[in-house]
Amino acid sequence: MSVDRAAAPSAQSDSTGVLGRVRVPGRAAAAPSGEDGRHTVGRRIIRRLRRPASPPDWVLVLSVLALVFIGLIFVFSSSLAISQELHGNTHHFALRQVIGAGIGLIAFGVLANIDYRRWQRISSLIIGGALVLLMLVLVPGVGHEENGAQRWIQIGSLPALQPSEFAKLAICIYVAAWLAAKGDEIKRIPLGLAPFCFIIGSVGGLIMLEPDLGTFAAISATGVVMFFLAGAALKHMVILFIGGSGVLFLIIGLFGYGLERVRSFFNAEEFAQDAGFQIINLVSTLGSGGLTGVGLGASRQKFFYVPSAHTDGVFAIIGEETGMLGAMIVLAIFGALIYRGIRAGMRAEDRFGTLLAFGIVAWFALQAFFNIAGVTRTIVLTGIPLPFLSFGSSALIASLAAAGILVSISRYGRGEFPVSADPPLNDAAPTRDVAPRPQRPPKPSPFHSGRGDGG
């Protein structure tokens, strides 16, 4: 009996290349006696639980750890004065950041050792939980207001939680799972653009009620990057750009939110003692470090010359204390993190892993750009924290959790076989890799001459 070996790879193919996993003819083994094939089911479950993983991408891991270490140093240095002023000691903010780093590093280690595909199955639960937390922020008695914005959940004496930071990771996971499931259907407005706008609008709308324009912009931009990389139609991207710009101008112009920052960006010197005070001092602080800086911990601008020096302005303090060389080292580490993250996404065997890796990388890259460009007065100051470096326990934990998933993609995305290539439950036949034969051209029909005249 002949076996069509060319058709076999299409049913049980390996997505990594042209080799397919097919049965070897004439060597089919019978199911174990007395078990009716149930032992094979058990082996399949064990094989999935013990899915082989590659060693971690150590460049990626070390880049993350280096940024966390640098962040702890400069949060302590930049928060000395404000911590003493508000809490009577110099280490209040630094201690909170250390606790956040400890929790985040635990999450980083755990998630790096969990197959990232598990999050695809529960992506709806993840985004649902994020929406519930964002709604709880707006509940009186639960949401905590500070500096005119209600962005935190405060329960008793427990540390405040900022749900919008975890919503960034939830958006990356859910949008990646949704885009992977939709495939080419995203090129159609009813199945692609319209639901995408609803997803981003639901999360972004709750964030704007806090309000937090910077986080809204970061989440929207990250989602748009993922939508584009998934293969969205060019005309849909144009619609998103025009619509997004309109929404942004509407928020700033109609509601006046962020209008002072826009004015201070164009005319900072006219508002030097008011709205332009922060941006003027950020630029002068960054430039005062020269080539090698004034020395670690020797910053003078952190003594109330730079508002929010330990959050929005931490990069300016880095530039002052370590100079242009220190700032360039930080940028180089970010560059290594972004490059290795893109590399992990490119090597992932499944669409979900690729889109998730690109989404997390876009999140880190866009936030770093918004923060550093704001500090250097390249764009309007957004108030977005610098990933891994700015003070904020919630932001640090969420960023480390996302970095752990990125490491997981670099490990499990290169497994020997994808889950979809598992043999049928009762197939105990030995297998080997064979190259599929090229398809032969069809034989000419006896009812057609081949001349195109039907004769």
Image (tube, helix red, strand yellow):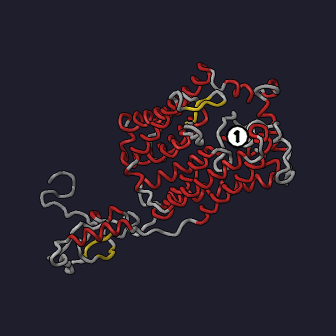
Residue sitting at 52 percent across and 69 percent down?
Answer: 55
450 displayed left or right of 406: left
Between 227 and 234, which is closer to the camera in this rendering? 227
Percent of width and height locating residue 417: 38, 67
Q: Residue furthest top?
A: 254
Q: Residue furthest bottom?
A: 27
Q: State the residue position of label 1.
A: 312
Q: Which residue lies furthest to the left in this view?
A: 447
Residue sitting at 38 percent across and 49 percent down?
Answer: 122
110 displayed left or right of 421: right
Percent of width and height locating residue 443: 20, 64
Between 185 and 50, which is closer to the camera in this rendering? 50
Between 79 and 113, which is closer to the camera in this rendering? 79
Q: In which quarter of the image is the C terminus?
A: bottom left
Residue sitting at 78 percent across and 41 percent down?
Answer: 84
Percent of width and height locating residue 372: 70, 43
Badge 1: few (under 14), some or many (20 or more) residues near its Cα, within 10 Å? many
Percent of width and height locating residue 196: 43, 37
Residue sitting at 47 percent across and 51 percent down?
Answer: 355
Between 103 and 269, which is closer to the camera in this rendering? 103
440 displayed left or right of 240: left
**Residue type marked 1:** Asp
Q: Is mark 1 on a helix, strand or loop?
A: loop
Q: Quadrant of the N terminus?
A: bottom left
Identify whether 99 is placed above or below 430: above
Q: How many labels does the image show?
A: 1
